[in-house]
Image (spheres, rainbow, N blue to C red):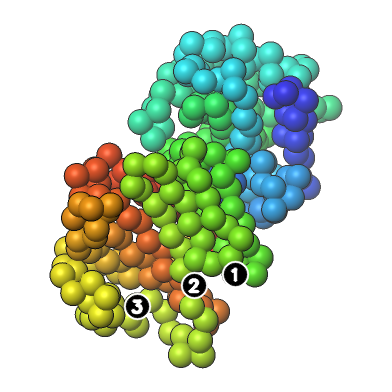
Amino acid sequence: MFSQKFGLFICFFVFFPIFIYSQTSVPYTNGKYGYKINLPKDWKMQFKPSEEDPQLVIVANEDGSNLSVYATQDKKLEGKNPETLGMNYFFDIVQTQFPSALYIQSESETIDNQPVIYAKYSYRNGNDDYTIGQFYVVIKDMLYTIQLFAKTNLYEPFEDIGKGLAYTFKGLNANASKYFKTDRFGFRISFPEGWQTIIDRPPFEAYDNKGGSVIIEIMESDDYKGITANDLDINDMIESIRKNKKDAILLEKNYIGIEGVPVLYGKYQWDEMVGNEKTTIIVQHYYIIKNKKLYILQTIVPLKQFYNYRDKFKACVESFQFTE
């Protein structure tokens, strides 16, 4: 499966005699393939096979040097890491794409607390010599190949920038089968693996059988025109909640950002009847305003299980991405 799709990595750009690298990067979230990474703000960006299915993301500098992230899913990767797969596995893939590539060196590194391999290869195309650097990251059944590609005489300074970007890579533990996108409301998100979903109409919801859930509510009004979440007051939010949940307590508040969009974060606690038993729950709200719409991303779980769900909720929220 991997070798058949690896051909997408073929990528040559017109070369210009400019030796300038952007020092400004912005976060990019690939909700479908479950990762985040910082990418240069001003470099040319391409998606293959399409922006709707960004299995391969490429950013290219004006001198033709480029960085790409290629994601592929293979159940055979479960329980393995790059070290157990070994360099022969990866070199076979590289030679499928670059038959004349020669191995230079490899070393073990860590990205996002995951063991990775960084390998370098030389490659000749016509009269031009290139150097290829590849980071191999395996998360569950996903292989992420972060590739640096440049003319050999440009590679050393490019490698410093490319490595710096690669080290910002973060897996979101997303499952492509739980990727959800709505054109009507202009966003995409990856729900936790194995959860049930209700996505035919808002509020959109994903839940498991242990009391955890993620809910996305959307309210559209001209009242939200020309403002952002930075204009919201958490006191108004808790007051609204207490109309139905009189015992609601505000535990934490903060102004943050997702994909450069302002977000008001609130963490609450109140009691709910679950069956015949009163249960204390923790609710997190992420308030986001865009295009006259208020989006409220909610996570809900019993207090006693909150810390077991914290990373799962965080990964889900971080996968949220506007498509407009």
- Secondary structure under the numbered disc 1 in the rendered image: loop
The disc label shown at residue 185, or none: 1
- Secondary structure under the numbered disc 2 in the rendered image: strand
- Secondary structure under the numbered disc 3 in the rendered image: helix
Q: How many marks?
A: 3
Query: Badge 3: how crowded within 10 Å, few (<14), some, or many (20+)?
Result: some
Check disc 1 and give the amino acid type: Phe
Vertical comparison of 138 with 16: above or below: above
Vertical comparison of 53 with 263: above or below: above
Marks 2/1 in contact by CB < 8 Å: the verdict is: yes
Mark 2 or mark 3, which is nearer to you? 2
Query: Badge 1: how crowded within 10 Å, few (<14), some, or many (20+)?
Result: some
Q: Quick one: quadrant of the C terminus?
A: bottom right
Kindly tell me whether residue 265 is visible in this rendering. yes
Task: Answer with left or right where residue 249 lies relative to residue 141.
Answer: left
Residue sitting at the far front: 276
Check disc 2 and give the amino acid type: Ile
Task: Locate residue 185: give its quadrant.
Answer: bottom right
Q: Earlier in the sequence, mark 2 or mark 1?
A: 1
Residue sitting at the far right: 126
Q: Nearer the viewer, residue 311 or 242?
A: 242
**Mark 2 — residue?**
218
